[in-house]
Image (tube, helix red, strand yellow):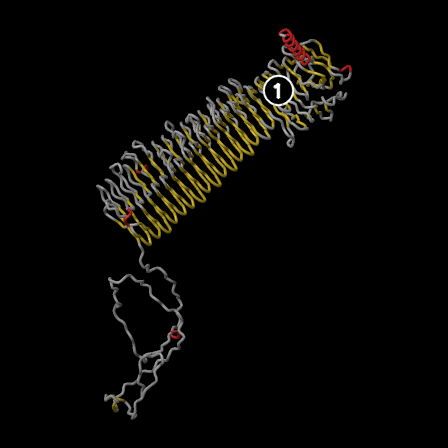
Amino acid sequence: MKTQALILILGLTIGLRLSDRAMAQVVPDQTLPLGERSQISGDPTFQIDGGAIRGNNLFHSFQQFSVPTGGSALFNNAPNITNIITRVTGSNLSNIDGLIRANGTANLFLINPNGILFGANARLELGGSFFASTAESLAFANGFEFSASNPQAPPLLTISAPIGLQYGNRSSEVRSQGAILQVPTGQTLALIGGNVTIDGGQLLAPGGRIALGGISEPGTVAFNPDASFSFPDRIARADVVLTNGAFVNVRAGGGGEIAITARNLKLTGASVLQTGIGAGLGSAQAQAGNITIQASEDITLEDESLINNSISSNGIGKGGDIRINARSLFVTNGAQVLAGTFSEGAGGSLTVNATDSVQIIGESSQFSSGLYSQASDRGNAGNLIINTKTLIIRDGAQVSSSTFSEGAGGSLTVNATDLIELIGTSADDLFPSGLLSSTEGRGNAGNLTINTRTLIIRDGAQALSSTFSEGAGGSLTVNATDLIELSGTSANGPFRSGLYSQSDSDSRGDAGNLSIDTRDLIVRNGAVVSSATSTSGAGGNLTIKATDSIRIFGTSADDKFSSVLSARTRASGNAGDIILNAKQFLIEDGGQVTSQQDNAAATGSVGNIRIEVGSLFVGNNASITVEDRSTIVDRPRTESVGNIDIQSNSVRVDRGLISAETASTDGGNIGLNVRDLLLLRNGGQISTNAGTAEAGGNGGNIVFNGNFIVAVPEENSIISANAFTGRGGNIRINTQGLFGIAPSTSNTTGLSRITASSEFGISGTIILNRPDVDPSRGLVQLPTELQDTSGLIASVCPADRGNSFAITGRGGLPQDPRQPLMSDSVWLDDRASTQSALPAQPVSQIQEAQGWIKQPDGSIHLVATYLGERSQTSPSPFCSLSSIGNP
């Protein structure tokens, strides 16, 4: 039984070896004219003679073409041959595990629709380019096709170089299984399938071109004059896979192109695509080639795989670009895409166009996943641009543009039409996920620009523009048409989610400006929007425009960090200004807006805070503060604390604080222009106090312009401009009404109050302007042409002619101080009278009495004329007095 089993195993082994032997053959077919058929000699070293010559082209046609392990196939062509064009008309794939050679500088085309496999021992010794394809035929300009599926002899007329690869219904694979395939400098190595798989091994074309790709439907892949390929737009493509450390390299002293066209492209197992200028190579005029990837569906890079186009150390020249076009791009597990320069030359740009999404996720034990544009010497880095619908960066991954020496960093621009999410940190909490633009040398960092509909940054992720050395930091600009939401900190707390523009310690460069334009901005749970300097460099300005609302609220999970909008300085550099515009601005639950000098030994000045909003709410331990903690008292006045200027329709401070305070210098000024109402509740405070370190400095000034200030008397709300040893500040309030709060000389009362005192100095002044009757209010321009008013006066009870009525003195009844205040306005009836004026009577002559009459009551009246009876006149119906007529 054992003997039978051994015989069976030996039989199978011999059979497999015979099968391999049969497969590893170079066998000509009979499709070419008899005198032009391929002539094969030797085995396993095959010499190939004969073939059909048309001009500079040599045609071979094989029933089978495979090279065994350790074997070779030598095309013994004449030196004047430019192209050796080979087809396989049989049904077997080509298994190449040995050497393929040709004479001179001829290019070699190998066409086998059944598939092509390069084994680990496959090698090329060619003077020209090498094209391996599973297309059915090669197309020529005169319409002739050198076809493997419909084999015909080439016409006798001279044929030019082929113009394209024609695919039929079959779409077989081209696979390299650990092979090292190399063409000479400046030549092309092309593997065009069906699917293309590079499993380990190397593809090398120094300074030349490597093309990988394929299609899965009938169509034509065209050859371009520059040896590149054009794939049809509306034909389904095939997949390209690089795995197990596959290395595709065209780096040299210049040139070097990599072009991949696929449905899906996957790089895994630390596989590499590399071009650029090598160490010690190149010249001032050298230009590295590009890496161009076109995928109709997805591109996936994982497991520390790398796409690299860079200038190596001591290389000279200009770097090439990386261009990635796909539906989606996934970069995970420490994979990276790098465009950079590590020498004098400028680095190339990195551009990603993904119609659906770009996802950069995670890290490996050595590398963060990411997209990078980098300069490490005197050369400038190129720009990094991402155009997509959705961008997700998480778990320690980064997209970064940076410079580490004299060269300038490139700009970083992200255009995501729907969403950008930056989430979390690395597993060890050492690196935040994010978008980064930085300089660690004398070169300036590039600008960071984010354009999207919605931006979400949470769990310690960051968007950061910074300088760590002499170079200036770039500006950070965020445009989000709908929403920006910044939330929380990393799991262990070292990283706070946010937007940052900063000049770090040990640097002398200025930080860039930070600008935000959105509909709604939410900063919560310890997140940050910060412009800061920790050195001699100036901090940038922080400008926020929200067409709807800004909301700052909450603290971190451990209550260590408040949510904050901040402009900060810790050294001699001046902090930038904070400028805010919104319809609604809410700061609550410990949220902060602060311009701060938080180092007692620092000399830099804080910036100003300018707020222009429809409504402002500061509540529940929230604050708007300008704070200078420096205790250096002899700083120049120009380095004093900044000011707060608020313009709003309404302001409510409810258990909140608006403050401009200093430890040792003059306090800042606070200007409040509130159209409707300033409401102070539950100990709300507005203060500009100086000398909080029990040192000098005069209190700042507070100016309020608005309709009303309202507080509850017993709630201890305060408006103060106090000092310690300096003079108290001035408070000027211009208002229509002040309710529930009043000036006070005491700071100990529990009542709501307004104070401008000094602990050991002169108190300041409090000026309240509450207008009474304004004599100039309602003035009208009087006419210059007077009219006759006699016809407008109705004298219904006139005096006789020649009489007069006079009023002397300043009369009037004094107001009773015990009565409630009444309006002083005068009622005036300006309606035109409808009564006719009665004519004035002539003055009666005074005459001597001529008689007398006795009245019924017994009284005697003297009369000028005696008529024998009493005479009366009829009074006017409007006159309340009777008159006695003249005789």
Residue 209 is at least partly visible in this image: no
- Crowding at dot 1, Cα within 10 Å, few <14 / some 14-19 / many 20+, comes out as many
Between 16 and 757, the one lying in front of the other is 16
Residue extending furthest toward the left: 760
On-image quarter of the N terminus: top right
Front residue of 523 and 205 = 523
Which element type, helix, strand or loop, lies under badge 1?
A: strand
User: Where 662 sits versus 22, above or below?
Assistant: below
Q: Residue furthest front?
A: 1
Q: Residue at x 62, y 17 (%)?
A: 118
Query: Residue 274, percent across and down?
Result: 54, 22
Q: From the viewer's perspective, is 789 left or right of 155? A: left
Horizontal and vertical percent for residue 524? 40, 38
- Closer to the camera, 698 or 32? 32
- Residue 389 location in percent, x, y? 53, 35
Q: Image quadrant for the C terminus?
A: bottom left
Q: Is residue 267 left or right of residue 872?
A: right
User: Residue flagged by tag 1: what amino acid is it?
Assistant: Arg
**Residue annotated with mark 1:** 175
Judged left or right of residue 178, residue 409 is left
Say which of 220 and 728 sits in front. Answer: 220
Locate residue 410, reporting x and y percent: 48, 29
How many badges with numbers are in the image? 1
Q: Quadrant of residue 669?
A: top left
Residue 573, placed above or below residue 650: above
Q: Please name the residue shown 30% across and 78% down the image.
A: 803
